[in-house]
Image (cartoon, rainbow, N blue to C red):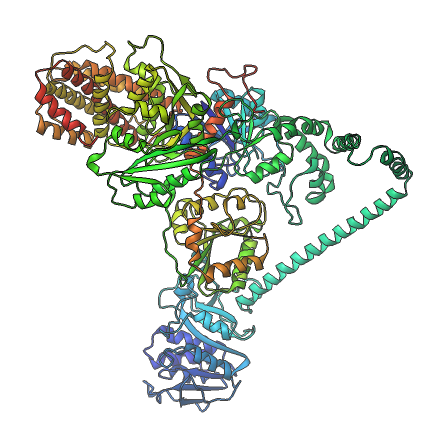
Amino acid sequence: MKILFAVHQFFPHHYTGTERVVLNLCRQLQRMGHDVIVLTYAIDSAEGLYPRGAFLVGKYSFQGIPVIAVRHRELPEDLDFIFRDEGMQALLESIIEDERVDIIHVCHPMRVGSIIPAAISRSLPVVVTLTDFWLLCPKFIAVTRGGIPCDGPRGGQRCSVECYEPSWKYRLRERLQEIDRVKNQVSAFVSPTEFLKRIFEGNRYRSVYRIPFGLDYQDIRIQEKKYNDDSAVVFGYLSTPVRHKGAHVLIDAFLRADMPNTNLKLFGDGSADREYYENVKSTSRGNPRVEFCGRYRHEDLPSILGSLDVVVIPSLWWENSPLVLLTALACGVPAVVSDLGGLTESVQDGVNGYSFKAGDIDALATVIRTIASSPSRLQELRAGITYPARIEEEAVLYEKLYQDIWRPGETPGKAGRRRRIP
Amino acid sequence: MPDPTNKRELILFSLKSCEAGEGTAYVKEYFFTSLIADGRSILDLGCGNGCGTVALGEVAQSVTGITREKPSFPDDRVEPSPNVTFLAGDPRALPFPEKKWDIVLLFSGESIKGSFDTVLAEVSRVLKDDGIFITTVQAMDIALGKPGGKYPLSEDSPSWRASIERVFPCIVGFSQTGDGGYGMVPLFPAEMGEVLENIPDKPGPDTPCLIVAARRPVTLPWLEGITWAAAGRSDQPVLEREQEKRIAFLESVIEQRDLEVQVARERNEKLKEEVVEMKRSVLWRCAMTYHTAIVEPLLGHATRRRRWYDAGLSGLRLVSNEGVSGLLWHVRGGGARKRHGSFSRLFDRSADRSTRSIRERISLIIPTKNAGYEFRYLLRKIRTQKGVSDVEIIVIDSGSSDETVAIARSFDCHVIEISPGQFHHGGTRNAAASHATGEYISFTVQDALPCGEFWLRDLVLPLAEDNSVSAATARQVPRSDADLFACFNIWANYQAIDFLRDKVVSAPPDCSSLSLMQWRKLAQIDDVCSAFRARIFSEFRFLTDYAEDLDIGVRLLKAGHKVAFVHSSAVIHSHNRTAAYFFRRSYADSFTLSTVFPHDGSFIPENRSPEEILGGIFSLYQTFNAAVKMVKEQSITELSEEMTQQIKFLMKSELARPDTADDAISPGEPSMDSLFYQLQERLPFRGSAHQDTRLLRLFFNNLDTFRDFRKRCGNPPQDPVEIEAALYKLFAAASGISLGGYLALLKEGNSVHTTSLETLHASLTEGI
C-alpha cells in the first residue's frame, strides 16, 4: 500500500523527535515492501520550490524517502495556530490525487492539518499519531501562561482565560470546532503513551490506540560501565535548552546537591532561546563540574550516552515520549525524570531510574545525592530497564492498523471504502 | 629616542633597552601594568631580573620587588630609582602588614611552585580592599575554554580560575591586539568562535592573557590604550555584568509574576462579587426555593428518580458548555470507550479480543549456539509478554562458548546441553519437545525478536479458539539493518506463498497431485515462529533434518488437520548474506524439496553431467558479469524497467555470440568468484551458457519480481552498490535452484554421475 505521512517539518532542516519518528517509520515500512511518501511544510526556506497557484511546492528525497514540501507564498501570521486552510486543502487534494495514495498518516497536523479534511473529502482513511497537544492546545505544550499544566481547552473557554486575551475566545472556539468536525471521521488516533491517550479520550476523542515509538537499534550501543561506591557519576541533559524543558531546575539542583564526585554535562542547541540559555549558563557560576557542550548530532547520541551515567529530564510540561529518554534506556543508561506526562511510564521510581516532583529543586537535589552517595545502585537500575520498543515492532503494529482500515483493490473515492475503527 | 616627558614611552624604552631576554611577553606584562600604575604602590612577586620592576618605578608611587636573591641587572645602565626596593623573601610568607599594597603582580612562577593557594592567601592579606592582583595565563587556554586548566606558572596548582575566584571573585582578562593595544576577552567558557571573534589576533600558544582580579569591581579609567570597548560599561569586569543581567532577568520574572497574581486576585474578587450578586437575584432565590421545596422532598438522594434528574441536569450543563455534539459524544462515544480496550479490532471484529489470554502453559523451544548479545533482549521480551499466563522456555544449547547458557539460566529457562555434533534441525527440536510440559509447544530461534507485547498470545490464539487447528505459523519482518536483498527475499517469499493476511487452511480433497509451490502455500510452517498442540506434535514430530517445518505441515494437512497463518503476529528476523551463501542455500532447498515433492513437470531433464551443468551456470555467470558491467558504464543506477530490460538484452546478446566458453574470465562478485574457484578445484567443470536456458528464464523471472518489489516501494533512490549486490544474489539464488533441481533428478534417476554428484552436493551443502 502507499502511505503518505504528513508532518509539520522534516529533514534535512529539522531533525528532532517527531521528524525522526517519521523517518524511521518510513524506512522500515519501505523495507517491508510498502510505498511511502512524506508531505511537509517548508517553513525555513522556499529554495527548490516552484509556484503552484497561491503556493509553492517542491520535491526532494531524503535517505531514500521521497518528500513533497509545500509552503504559502506569503507565510500567514497564524500559520502555527490554524488547523484548516481552504486553499491548502485544495492543493493537498490534488497532491493526494496525483500520488495515488492509499492511506494518510498524520504525525503532526500543525501547518499541514488541511490534509485531514482533504483526505476525508477523497474518502481516504486517515490515521493520526498524537505527538503532542496541538489538536487541543495551539501552544502544543498544554501549559498555561502561569506555568500550570493544562488538561484540556473546555471548548476554548479555558484558553481565552488562561493563555490568550479574551478577544481570542471566538477564534479559539472556532478552531476547536473545525477540528471537532473532522476528528470523528479520522479512522484512528494513536498515542505512544497511556498518558496522552487518557488526555485525549478525556477531551472527547474516540478510542485512542496505543503504539509506542520504536527505536532503530542498529544505532544503539549498550553502555557496560561497571559501578562501585567510589565511582564518579556523570549526569547528562540532552534536550533543547528552553524554559519548559527545565534546564534551570537541573542546574540549581545540581549545585544545591554539591556532590564532589559528580559532573553535569548539558547538550543542546542554545539558539532556540538565547536569553534563557545565557541565563542558565550564568547560573552555573563557572562551576568546573558543569559543562555546556553545545549542539549535538543524532548520530553522536550513542557515544554521548556512553559517556553519561544518568540522563536527567527535568521537564516542566507534559512530556510525551521523548526519543532521548527511550534511547538512553535502550543504551542501558538509567534516567531521572519529572513526574509529569508520559515520562513515568518509561521510568519506574527506584526500578530503572527515579522520578521527582516537577520543578522541585530540592527533590531533584535529593535524588542526585542519593545516586552520588551510592553509585553502585546504578547497576541495579540498569538491570531494571525494560528495553523500549524497536522500530520494526512499531512498523508491524502500524501495518496491522493500516490493514484493518484499508482493503487492497478498493479504488480511491469509492463510497464506504474508508473504515473507521469504532 | 623616546619622549622623556612621556613616562610610558620611557618605560617601554627602559624595558627594551634592558634586553631582558625574557621575550616580548615580559615587556607586555610590565607595559600593561604601567598603564594603571600611576601613583600606586606596587608589590612585584617573583620579579625575575628586576628590569620590569625598575621600569615601573618611573610611574608608580613605590615599587617593591620580592626575589629570592638580589637581582643582577643585565644592563649596567639600569639603576633603580629611590622608590624602588628589592627584598629577599618568600611570597608564601610576606613580611608586610595587612592591606598595604594597591597592586600586587605575579608574572613569574619561580618562587611559587606547589603553593599557589598559599600565595593567593598572602596576596589577599596584603592587598588593600580596592586593590587589584595581576597575573598571567596562556591566552589559548581561555580561547579553548579551559577554565579548569592548570595555572601555568605552577605545575602543581589546581584550576587557576577556581583558586583565584575563591579569593578574588571579580576577574577580567586582557589580551593584546595586533596593534599593540589591549582588548577585553570574555573570561567564561564560551564557544571557540565567540572567543576568537573577540580577539582580532588569534592568540598563539605564547600570547599571554593578563588576568586582573579584585575583591569587588574597580574602575580602570586610565586604560586609554584599549583598542575597543566592551558593550555597556566596559570599565566593569565581565563577571559583574553577567550577575547584573541575571538579577535584572530575575527581577523581570518576579515583576511578571506579581502582575499575574494581581490579575488573578482581581478576577477572584470580581467572581466573588458576581456570586454575591447572583445569590441576591430573584432567579437564584426561585431556583433555591424550587430545589428545597420540591426537588429535595420528592427526589430523595440515592434514589433512581434522583439519579435520572441529576443526569438530566448534567446533560443540560454539557449542552450549554460544549454543545449538542458534546452530549452525543458522552451518550455514544463515552460508552464505547468503556467497552473496548486497545487493539480490539486488530485480529477480528470481536469486541473483547484484547482481553483474551492463554491460560494454558506454553512451552517455547529455542535451539541455541553462541546466541550473542541480543539473546538477553529476546528472553526479556518473552518474559514480559502479555496475554499469556504460563510460559516455559526450553533452551537446547549445542556447545555455546559464550554466556548463552548462563543468560538462559538467569531467565529461569530449562536448559538442555548437547554437543555440537549432536545437533540436527529436526532431531534437536524433537529432543527439546520431549521435555516440554505445556499444552502448546512453540518454536523460535535465538535471533528472532518478538514484535509487540502480544506476539506469543496472537500466535497461539488460533489453536486455543479452534480445536481443528493443530499448528500455527507467523511471519518474519526484516531487521532495520537488513540489506536490500534480505528485504526482498522476505517479501517475495510471502508473496509466493500468499501469506498476506490471517487465514486458516486445510488440504483440498485431492491433494496427491499438488506441486511444491501449492504445498508451500498451504503448509509452509516456519520454525522461526510456529506453534503446535503438544499432543499433536508428539504424534507427528519432525522427521527430516532439512525443511522439517514444511514436511510436518504437509503431513498434518494430509491427516486432516488445519494450519493457521497468523500474519498479525511477527518476529524480527533477517540476515545479510553473500551471494555465494544464497547459491548454496537455494541449492540445498531446491535439492531437498525436489526429492520430497513431485516436480511440476515443466522441467525437462537434459542428459548432462554435473560438471556440464555447473559449467553452464559458470558461463552464464560470466555473461551476467559482462551485462552488469555494461549497465554500470551506462550509468544506470536505479532498478527501473530500463535497467532490467538492458540486462536481459545484454545477456541474450552475449548468448547469441559464438561459443564464449574460451573467453577470458573477468572477476565478478567476490564471494561467487571464490565459490566457483573452490568448486573448480574439487570438480573441474566445463560447459556453455547456450545450453542453460532454464536458468536464464528463472533468473529473468526473479529479476522481474525484484523490479516489482522496488516498484511497490515507490522505487526510491538506492545505493547503486546495493542494487548491484542484490542482482548478484538474485542470480546466485536462481543458479542454486536450477542446479539443485537438476541434481535431484539425476539422483532420482540413478545417474551414472554418482561420484561427481556426491562431490558437488557435499561441497555445496557444507555448513548449510
Judged left or right of residue A333, residue B40 is right
Q: Looking at the image, which is closer to me, A329 or B399?
A: B399
Q: Position of residue B696 (x, y in %)?
A: 22, 16
Residue B154 quadrant: bottom left
Q: Position of residue A224 (x, y in %)?
A: 36, 51
- Front in this rendered view, residue B440 or A157: B440
Q: Quadrant of residue B396?
A: top left
Residue B627 visible in the shown view: no
Q: Please identify the quadrant where the C terminus of chain B is shown.
A: top left
Q: Residue furthest bottom?
A: B82
In the image, residue B76 sits, relative to residue A265, either above or below, namely: below
In the visual, does B675 lie left or right of B109?
A: left
Q: Where the N terminus of chain B falls, by quadrant?
A: bottom left
Residue A78 x %, y %: 63, 37
Q: Residue at x 57, y 38 (%)?
A: A196
Give B91 or B437, whichever is nearer the viewer: B437
Tally of numbered discs: 0
Residue name at image x 12 percent, y 30 percent: B678
User: Image height check: is B694 above or below B191?
Assistant: above
* Furthest residue toward right: B282
